[in-house]
C-alpha cells in the first residue's frame, strides 16, 4: 500500500491526430459518417495458478490462416467481424443466430449488408456468408436494421428496413430458402415487398427498424416501427401495425406509444417480463401470467438506449409506463456508456431473455482505418425485472461467460484508508473477469426519486481524481505500474440539500490512454441501493479495449471503450483505491479471473460444434 496524490497530473506523450497528411482522408470519412444512419443489431485469499496476460484472440480466415492476432485493442472474447465495420437475433435448431449490420468493404459506415454468424454457446461464433444484400429497388441503397420472428409453426421470418432507390425507408420481409437448414444459409425476399410503408402524414425518410412481431389472443400479429412526428419531428413514436397472415400489414392509425421531446425512435423493442422470477418469456406468451412490459427505443438524437417498464393493454393496444418521470426516452437506460441499437430475444433452450448491444469505437476514424476494423457487440446479457422496485431491469452476463474463467485470485478484507492505493500484484493482463464487494459506508440515504434516476450522474465533474469526503473509491484496470494510464470504475456519494446523500457509480476514461485522440468521457449514473444491502458490488469484464461494468447485481450497467498505449497485455495491472478524504473503505472480498480467448472462425473451418 502507498499514499500519494496519485490521480493528479497531466497526460504526456501526446500524439497528434491530423498527422502524416491525413486531413483529406479524415474529412472525407467524416462526411460518410455524418450522412449515415446508425444500426440496430439483429438478431446472446488464495492465489491459484500463474497469472499471465491472455493470448490474443485468433480470427481464422477461409484458408485457415490466423490474422489480427497482435493488435492490442482487438477484443479476446467479444464478438466482432473479421475486419471492417460492423440486426435480429434468434435461437433456431440448436444454433444462436446473430444478424448484424456489416460493411464488407471498409471499417466505416456504408455499403451495409446483413452479416450472419452462428454459435452454440453465445461466445464462439462462426462467420457465415451475408444473409442479405441490397439487390432490389426497395433496398438497393442499404439493407438496414430489423428483427427475427418465429411463426406459430416455428418458421423464422426476417423483417428489415430497406432504403429504396428514391431514398425512402420501407419495411421488407425475407424467409429461409430451406427451413430444415439449421444454419439458415440462404434467404428469399418475398415478391410483394415492401410489406409496410410509411403511413400518410409520417416522414418516409424517418421510418425504420421493425420490431419482433407478437401475436395477441385474437390471433392478429402486431409489429412496431420506429418513427417521429410533430413539428420538426420532436415527438418520438413507435407506430403499430397489425396482420392476420403476417404478409399483409395495416397501420392502426395511432402509435403504441409516443413521448414528446425525444426525437426519432430507432430500433424499438417490446417484450413481457415476469413480475416475480428471472425466467424470460416469448413475446406472445402473456396469457394467464402476471407480467409487465418493457418498451425500449434507441434515441437517434442522443445515441442512447432508453427503456421503461409498464402495462400493456392488449384489448386496445396501448402502453402506459409505471412511472411517467421514467417514460421511454427520458428515463432509464440499458447502459450508461457506449451501448446503442440493442436487441433482445427469447432463448427457448434456457428460458432466458438475452440482450446484446452495439458498442462503437471511441478512438479516431483514422485509427479505425489503420487497424482495419471498427465496432464490437457487447457481451450477451440476461435481463429480467428487478422484483424490489418492479420499475427497472437487472442485467447480468450470460452464464456461459464463466466458462472462460481461469486462475482465480481471491482476497478478503482489504483495508483502504483515505488516499490509498492497493496493488493487486498477483494479477496482470487485459482479459479479466472481476467481482468485488465493498462494505457499504454507514450513510443515511433516502430512496432515490424518479426524477433523479432520469438525470445523468456528474461523473465528469466527480471523476476518480476529484477527492471528496465520501469517495471516490473502487478499482483501477488497464493500469500502468506508475498509474499514468488507468481506467477507474468507482462508487462515490454526492449530497444535495433537497435529496441528501446519494450513491453514484462511474466509469472514468479520462486517463485511460496516452493517446489524446480518444474519447475521455466519464460515464455513470445514480444507483439504487437499499437499506437491506450491506455491500456495494461491482462485476467488471475487461477485454483490451472494452470495460463492461455491472453494479449492484446489474441494476446499473456501463460500457466504456478505452485504448491504452502502455497498459496492454503483461503491462496491464489492477489496483484498488480510495480517494476520499475521510472515509475508511474495506472490501468484503474480491475475486479476479484471467479470461480465455475464444476463436472466431468461418464456419467451413470449424471441425466441431463448441
Image (spheres, rainbow, N blue to C red):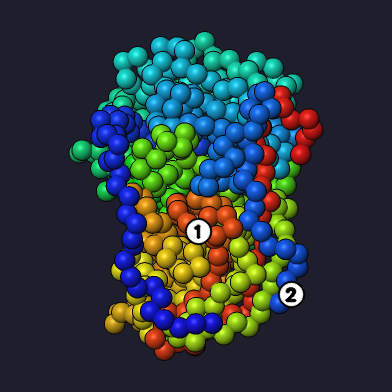
Say if 374 sits above or below 186 in the image.
below
* Residue plotted at (33% across, 60% down): 12
**Label 2 close to label 1 by CB (< 8 Å):** no
Q: Is residue 407 left or right of residue 386?
A: right
Frontmost of labels 2 and 1 is: 1
Element carrying mark 2: loop
Element carrying mark 1: loop
Say if 223 sits above or below 56 in the image.
above
Residue placed under numbered mark 1 in the picture:
567
* Residue 483 circle label: none
In the rendered image, is residue 390 in sight? no
Coordinates of residue 323 in the picture (x, y in percent): 41, 61
Query: Nearer the N terminus, badge 2 or badge 1?
Result: 2
Q: Residues within 10 Å of mark 1 (few under 14, many from 20)?
A: many
* Residue plotted at (38% across, 46% down): 363
Coordinates of residue 344 in the picture (x, y in percent): 56, 43
Coordinates of residue 555 in the picture (x, y in percent): 52, 63
Residue placed under numbered mark 2 in the picture:
46
Amino acid at each position: 500500500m502507498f499514499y500519494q496524490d496519485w490521480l493528479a497530473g497531466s497526460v504526456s506523450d501526446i500524439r497528434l491526430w491530423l498527422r502524416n497528411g491525413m486531413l483529406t482522408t479524415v474529412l472525407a470519412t467524416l462526411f460518410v459518417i455524418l450522412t449515415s444512419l446508425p444500426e440496430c443489431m439483429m438478431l446472446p485469499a488464495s492465489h491459484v495458478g500463474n497469472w499471465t496476460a491472455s493470448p490474443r484472440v485468433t480470427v481464422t480466415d477461409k484458408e485457415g490462416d490466423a490474422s489480427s492476432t497482435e493488435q492490442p485493442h482487438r477484443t479476446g472474447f467479444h464478438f466482432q467481424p473479421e475486419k471492417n465495420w460492423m440486426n435480429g437475433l434468434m435461437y433456431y435448431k440448436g444454433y444462436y443466430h446473430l444478424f448484424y449490420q456489416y460493411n464488407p468493404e471498409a471499417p466505416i459506415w456504408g455499403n451495409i449488408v446483413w452479416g450472419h454468424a452462428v454459435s452454440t454457446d453465445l461466445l464462439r461464433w462462426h462467420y457465415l456468408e451475408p444473409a442479405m444484400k441490397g439487390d432490389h429497388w426497395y433496398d438497393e441503397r442499404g439493407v438496414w436494421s430489423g428483427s427475427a420472428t418465429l411463426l406459430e409453426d416455428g418458421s423464422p421470418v426476417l423483417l428489415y428496413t430497406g432504403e429504396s432507390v428514391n431514398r425512402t425507408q420501407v419495411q421488407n420481409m425475407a424467409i429461409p430458402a430451406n427451413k430444415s437448414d439449421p444454419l439458415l444459409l440462404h434467404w428469399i425476399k418475398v415478391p410483394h415487398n415492401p410489406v409496410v410503408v410509411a403511413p400518410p402524414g409520417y416522414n418516409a425518410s424517418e421510418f425504420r427498424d421493425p420490431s419482433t412481431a407478437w401475436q395477441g389472443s385474437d390471433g392478429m400479429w402486431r409489429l412496431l416501427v420506429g418513427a417521429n412526428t410533430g413539428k420538426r419531428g420532436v415527438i418520438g413514436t413507435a407506430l403499430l401495425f397489425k396482420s392476420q397472415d403476417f404478409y399483409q400489414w395495416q397501420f392502426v392509425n395511432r402509435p403504441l406509444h409516443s413521448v414528446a421531446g425525444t426525437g426519432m425512435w430507432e430500433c424499438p423493442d417490446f417484450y413481457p417480463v415476469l413480475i416475480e422470477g428471472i425466467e424470460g418469456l416469448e413475446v406472445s406468451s402473456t396469457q394467464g401470467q402476471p407480467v409487465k412490459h418493457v418498451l425500449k427505443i434507441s434515441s437517434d438524437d442522443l445515441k442512447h438506449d432508453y427503456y421503461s417498464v409498464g402495462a400493456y393493454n392488449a384489448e386496445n393496444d396501448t402502453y402506459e409506463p409505471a412511472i411517467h418521470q421514467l417514460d421511454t426516452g427520458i428515463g432509464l437506460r440499458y447502459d450508461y456508456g457506449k451501448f446503442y441499437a440493442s436487441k433482445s430475444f427469447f432463448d427457448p433452450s434456457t428460458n432466458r431473455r438475452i440482450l446484446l448491444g452495439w458498442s462503437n469505437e471511441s478512438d479516431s476514424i483514422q485509427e479505425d482505418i489503420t487497424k482495419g476494423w471498427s465496432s464490437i457487440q457487447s457481451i450477451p446479457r440476461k435481463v429480467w425485472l428487478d422484483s424490489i422496485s418492479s420499475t427497472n431491469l437487472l442485467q447480468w452476463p450470460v452464464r456461459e461467460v464463466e466458462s472462460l474463467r481461469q486462475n482465480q485470485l481471491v482476497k478478503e478484507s482489504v483495508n483502504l484508508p483515505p488516499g490509498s492505493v492497493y496493488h493487486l500484484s498477483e494479477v496482470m493482463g487485459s482479459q479479466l473477469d472481476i467481482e468485488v464487494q465493498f462494505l457499504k459506508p454507514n450513510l443515511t440515504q433516502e430512496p432515490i426519486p424518479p426524477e433523479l434516476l432520469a438525470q445523468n450522474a456528474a461523473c465528469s465533474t466527480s471523476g476518480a481524481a476529484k477527492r471528496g469526503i465520501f469517495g471516490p473509491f473502487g478499482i483501477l484496470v488497464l493500469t500502468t505500474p506508475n498509474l499514468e494510464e488507468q481506467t477507474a470504475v468507482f462508487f462515490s456519494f454526492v449530497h444535495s440539500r433537497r435529496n441528501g446523500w446519494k450513491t453514484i457509480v462511474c466509469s472514468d476514461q479520462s486517463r485511460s490512454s496516452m493517446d489524446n485522440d480518444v474519447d475521455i468521457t466519464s460515464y455513470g449514473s445514480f444507483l439504487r441501493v437499499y437499506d437491506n444491502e450491506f455491500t456495494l458490488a461491482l462485476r467488471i469484464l475487461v477485454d483490451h479495449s472494452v470495460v463492461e461494468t455491472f453494479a449492484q447485481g446489474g441494476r446499473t450497467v456501463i460500457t466504456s471503450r478505452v485504448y491504452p498505449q502502455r497498459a496492454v497485455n503483461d503491462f496491464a495491472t489492477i489496483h484498488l483505491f480510495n480517494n476520499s478524504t475521510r472515509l475508511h473503505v474495506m472490501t468484503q472480498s474480491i475475486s479476479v479471473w484471467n479470461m480465455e480467448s475464444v476463436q472466431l472462425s468461418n464456419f467451413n473451418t470449424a471441425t466441431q460444434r463448441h
